[in-house]
Amino acid sequence: MSLDLPATLSGASGCRTAPVLKERGQREVFCGLTGIIWLHRKMQDAFFLVVGSRTCAHLLQAAAGVMIFAEPRFGTAILEEKDLAGLADANAELDREVARLLSRRPDIKQLFLVGSCPSEVIKLDLARAAERLSGLHAPHVRVYNYSGSGIETTFTQGEDACLAAMVPTLAGTTARELLVVGALPDVVEDQCLALLAALGIGPVRMLPARRSADLPAVGANTVFALVQPFLGDTHAALTRRGARHLAAPFPFGEQGTTAWLRAIATEFGISDDVFDRVTAAPRARALKAIAAQSVELQGKSVFFFPDSQLEIPLARFLARECGMTPIEVGTPYLHDALHGPDLDLLPSGPTISEGQDVEKQLDRQRAARPDLTICGLGLANPLEAQGFTTKWAIELVFTPVHFYEQAGDLAGLFSRPLRRKALLQAGAQA
Ligand code: SF4
């Protein structure tokens, strides 16, 4: 068993105090509406109604892929030209559409009105609409509102905005409870809960909950741990409710998962013996799986374009557990309270950049010639055509990658493009 101390404590220096290259310019990112794709699967009695244009509807269809044929619990109330002329009409129309939707889908218990660029530009007051509709449809349905617009949110920030909108409405409690925050696929959530239960930690609540009846309560004795690094606003909203954040690296890879669990175990006074007994077997499995998947990654360089805010913990995982050298780690936003523990563990060296000026960043990427480039769909194929090996960042959000049992799969997501490139080259030479 090795002692896993933050790099700064073990003598090596991390990236927490490294200068950050801040850029503001043209961006190549999704808007926050995309969060609906995974949130609607997680919250089984929720419906997400985007109030937007045909562009928004097309984006959701494109991002959801085949899911749109499975009677998904999301849709778009498309603003027509006449809605733009008079806001009163737009509100009446929205009330009508919502009433029709709720009568058709009585299983819906939570309705999210999701703002978009068009609804924001015409200043449609969705917060007021949510209040009005909540009154009309209470107690059967609770109506929330948040913005997923491209003006306000980037990709995974949509989940942050959604969860932050729920926090003020959660019931109060004085119980000392652990709240785990961030949407995880059900199978991964079950693994997380099983590990915490085996450690003797409980009761544990989840935000988001699978069903509205299981929504957590929150108060001054709540401690919360985040499983996603993009939940800055939710962190702030929970803190305002008196809850306390347990700062920890995110549970990616064997080291990240161990450090995350360790922070919670320490808070709840769990002994080292119990901790080691519970984690020894899954840690060993994770290490073996990572070793098998990371052969191609050892000694290779990696360049992250900003996309999901997962970049810093993933760069930490690739550097420390897969032997990669990060050249640049771009993130759309950098929150010290959230990303700090991972920055501590990220070996010094890479440029840490926040925001984007895509042309300048492409120049740096071309000059650095990384072995692997992590980027969005819009950049991936053009870069492949220039001879670079790329990994689509969106897959990292849609694929189960947290905790011990997924650590090998996580490494595999990065090694697969390198393996494929090697196979294609070998085939071309044969
Ligand atoms: S919310 Fe804005 S950025 Fe997103 S699809 Fe609609 S118009 Fe485009």
Image (cartoon, rainbow, N blue to C red):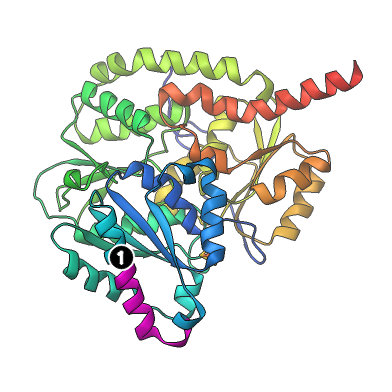
| Mark 1 nearby-residue class (10 Å; few <14, some 14–19, many ≥20) | some
Q: Is residue 95 magenta?
A: yes
Whether residue 237 is visible to the viewer of this picture, yes or no, is no
Taking the spot 47% from the left edge, 73% from the top edge, the residue there is 79
* Up-down relation of residue 165 to residue 126 (above or below): above
The residue range painted magenta reads 84-97
Q: Residue furthest right?
A: 429
* Residue underneath mark 1: 98
Q: Position of residue 387 (x, y in %)?
A: 83, 38
Q: Is residue 271 left or right of residue 185?
A: left
Q: Secondary structure at mark 1?
A: helix
Q: Is residue 190 left or right of residue 403?
A: left
Taking the spot 78% from the left edge, 40% from the top edge, the residue there is 384
Whether residue 339 is visible to the viewer of this picture, yes or no, is yes
* Up-down relation of residue 358 to residue 315 (above or below): below
Toward the viewer: 214 or 249?
A: 214
Quick check: is the Cβ at mark 1 less than 8 Å away from ligand 1?
no
Q: Position of residue 264 (x, y in %)?
A: 27, 34
Taking the spot 70% from the left edge, 34% from the top edge, the residue there is 301
Main SS category, magenta section:
helix
- Quarter of the image where one finds residue 205: top left
- Quarter of the image where one finds residue 1: top left
Quadrant of the snapshot with the C terminus: top right
Ligand 1's quadrant is bottom right
* Up-down relation of residue 326 to residue 150 (above or below): above
Amino acid type shown at disc 1 = Val
Q: Is residue 89 magenta?
A: yes
